């Protein structure tokens, strides 16, 4: 055991160290005494005597066959602390935990009944013949799970292929934690079923396998936990899903999986038709709802609205609806393009990170911090730290805007001036507008979206984001007057946007799976709206609080 382990989680690591120490001592003693006593460390369902018969049946058989004494130290795999210790032990053998039971002997760890049955006699033969344990085997040889193929398995495997349940999970996923005991029990109930487990937040190869598998099954790698059986799949975890998986395994094993070759009624997907986006699966609805809701709140950004109303006010004075419409349209097109590129950059970075837990935590903490600063601005506008366009830029923006638009006679010059103005503003207002794109990009990346699905979500985001500003432009063109936007409106928008941002960050930090269900989304935005209304009500009843 490496010394660094002793500094963390004393109780668990003490057990790990004890196991390692006993193994070394056991191996040495076996060699010195003619291999008469051999230490084994076994992780199984030892609380169920009729489920796990390794100690009661198999050990006596092997002792009689090889004329040895097997000193078995057994651990109950159904206990969470033992599973945690086992995971750390397996890292010493260059393995990840996939299935149980697990046997640690000498230089190797064997996972699954088939692997133990195959390799334990070979270990004993080698020890008796050479006085030492076998060299360490590659992980794929030491587990009952077949070595991962170069591509994901076909959606409908041949009946002769041994069935496999592909399970994708991530560190820090509460639903994954609830799914693990179920999978362990499923493995015991159906020992002929292979369960291949892939952790996707730390292993990029596993994340890629997740995406490839999902594509072959006709879905997307949008969330974990995810389960794939021949012909069907499940995203998320609940008692209902657990029951469906158990029933599917039972039916599949009984019918040699032929019953699952065609779509099963319990996994038929419902769809809705959305304008511009076409046919969307209801299972994907949470991503679209979250995208639309975040973009709607982001669209009422006080920084963007202040600049737009100022710009429109300059052009309205010319009395030309065409010039007003042209300036407004060009300004929105340029700012939306810059905003979209910024979001694509964030998404690319988060997608490349491969769903690392630390990234999610950092993004959530940033969102909470930025949201609290926005809420602070409702009570103390631009006092202290504030995420707005810096006050020092306001006079320069006003002077530059007036000089540019008062001197731009030709339409081409006016459009060029608007483009330059919009580019400059997009950069200056970035600290004010970056919060929602930050958390949305990480959210979409965590769903495993990519390609067409990401393009659809980004398009939806930008369309909803622009809706409020398009309304400002249209009203200004129709009425030929500038819409006023001052500090009072900015305070309210910052309060609502900040509350939503805090709610998103906190939810994403503590219960990220809530953002993947319609109920979770409803509760999150509903509570944020309720808090905003309560603060506004209290502030109206006590106006002096804001004056001070």
Image (cartoon, rainbow, N blue to C red):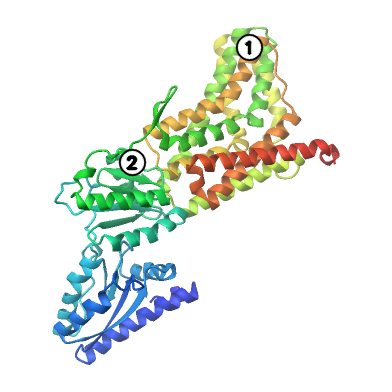
| Residue 411 drawn at (x, y percent) | 57, 10
Q: Quadrant of residue 171?
A: bottom left
Question: Is residue 110 in view from this perspective?
Answer: yes
In percent of the image, x 26 and y 79: which residue is there? 56
Q: Are marks 2 and 1 in contact (CB under 8 Å)?
A: no
Q: How far apart, in angstroms, are the residues tagged by discs 2 and 1? A: 53 Å
| Residue 292 drawn at (x, y percent) | 52, 32
| Residue 487 drawn at (x, y percent) | 75, 31
Q: Is the residue 141 above or below the residue 495 in the image?
A: below
Q: What crowding class fits label 2: few (fewer than 14 Cα within 10 Å), some (14-19), or many (20 or more)?
A: few
- Left or right, 254 with respect to 488, comes to left
Q: Secondary structure at mark 1?
A: helix
- Left or right, 349 with respect to 543, comes to left
- Left or right, 339 with respect to 393, comes to left
Residue bearing mark 1: 477
In percent of the image, x 72 and y 28: which residue is there? 395
Q: Foreground: 492 or 289?
A: 289
Which quarter of the rendered picture does the N terminus lie within?
bottom left
In percent of the image, x 42 and y 36: which residue is there? 284
Which quarter of the rendered picture does the C terminus lie within?
top right
Mark 2 vs mark 1, foreground winner is: 2
Q: What crowding class fits label 1: few (fewer than 14 Cα within 10 Å), some (14-19), or many (20 or more)?
A: many
Q: Foreground: 460 or 165?
A: 165
Name the residue at the bottom extreme: 33
What is the number of the mark on residue 195? none
What is the number of the mark on residue 266? 2
Question: Is residue 354 in view from this perspective?
Answer: no
Q: Secondary structure at mark 2?
A: helix
Sequence-wise, which precedes: disc 2 or disc 1? 2
Q: Quadrant of residue 528?
A: top right
Q: Foreground: 333 or 405?
A: 333
């Amino acid at each position: 055991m490496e010394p660094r382990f002793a500094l963390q989680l004393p109780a668990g690591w003490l057990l790990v160290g004890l196991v390692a120490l006993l193994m070394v001592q056991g191996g040495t003693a076996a060699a010195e005494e003619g291999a008469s006593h051999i230490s084994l460390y076994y992780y199984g369902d030892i609380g169920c005597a009729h489920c796990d018969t390794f100690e009661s049946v198999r050990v006596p058989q092997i002792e009689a066959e090889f004329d040895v004494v097997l000193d078995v130290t057994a651990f109950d795999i159904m206990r969470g602390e033992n599973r945690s210790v086992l995971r750390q032990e397996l890292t010493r053998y260059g393995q990840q935990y996939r299935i149980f039971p697990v046997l640690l002997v000498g230089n190797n760890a064997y996972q699954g009944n088939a692997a133990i049955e195959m390799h334990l006699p070979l270990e004993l033969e080698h020890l008796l013949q050479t006085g030492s344990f076998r060299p360490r085997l590659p992980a794929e040889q030491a587990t009952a799970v077949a070595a991962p193929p170069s591509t994901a398995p076909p959606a409908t495997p041949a009946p002769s292929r041994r069935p496999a349940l592909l399970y994708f999970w991530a560190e820090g996923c509460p639903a994954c934690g609830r799914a693990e005991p179920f999978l362990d029990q499923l493995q015991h109930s159906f020992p002929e079923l292979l369960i291949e487990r892939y952790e996707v937040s730390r292993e990029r190869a596993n994340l890629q396998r997740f995406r490839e598998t999902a594509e072959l099954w006709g879905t997307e790698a949008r969330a974990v936990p995810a389960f794939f059986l021949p012909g069907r799949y499940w995203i998320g975890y609940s008692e209902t899903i657990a029951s469906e998986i158990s029933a599917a395994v039972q039916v599949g094993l009984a019918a040699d999986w032929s019953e699952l070759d065609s779509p099963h009624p319990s996994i038929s997907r419902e769809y809705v038709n959305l304008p511009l986006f076409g046919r969307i699966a209801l299972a994907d609805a949470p991503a679209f709802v979250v995208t639309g809701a975040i973009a709607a709140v982001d669209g009422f950004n006080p920084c963007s609205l202040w600049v737009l109303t100022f710009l429109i006010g300059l052009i309205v004075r010319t009395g030309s609806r065409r010039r007003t419409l042209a300036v407004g349209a060009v300004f929105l097109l340029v700012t939306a393009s810059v905003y979209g590129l910024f979001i694509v950059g964030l998404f690319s970075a988060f997608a490349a990170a491969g769903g690392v837990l630390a990234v999610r935590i950092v993004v959530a903490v940033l969102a909470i911090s930025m949201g609290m600063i926005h809420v602070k601005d409702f009570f103390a506008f631009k006092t202290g730290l504030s995420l707005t366009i810096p006050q020092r830029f306001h006079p320069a923006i006003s002077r530059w805007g007036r000089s540019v638009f008062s001197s731009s006679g030709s339409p081409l010059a006016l459009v060029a001036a608007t483009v330059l103005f919009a580019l400059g503003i997009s950069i200056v207002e970035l600290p004010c507008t970056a919060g929602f794109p930050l958390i949305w990009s990480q959210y979409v990346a965590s769903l495993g979206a990519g390609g067409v699905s990401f393009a659809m979500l980004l398009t939806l985001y930008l369309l909803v984001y622009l809706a409020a500003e398009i309304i400002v432009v249209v009203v200004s063109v129709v009425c030929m007057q500038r819409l006023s936007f001052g500090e009072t409106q900015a305070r309210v928008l910052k309060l609502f946007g900040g509350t939503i941002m805090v709610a998103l960050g906190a939810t994403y930090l503590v219960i990220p799976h809530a953002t993947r269900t319609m109920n979770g989304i409803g509760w999150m935005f509903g509570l944020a709206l309720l808090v905003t209304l309560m603060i506004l009500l209290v502030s109206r009843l006590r106006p002096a609080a804001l004056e001070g």
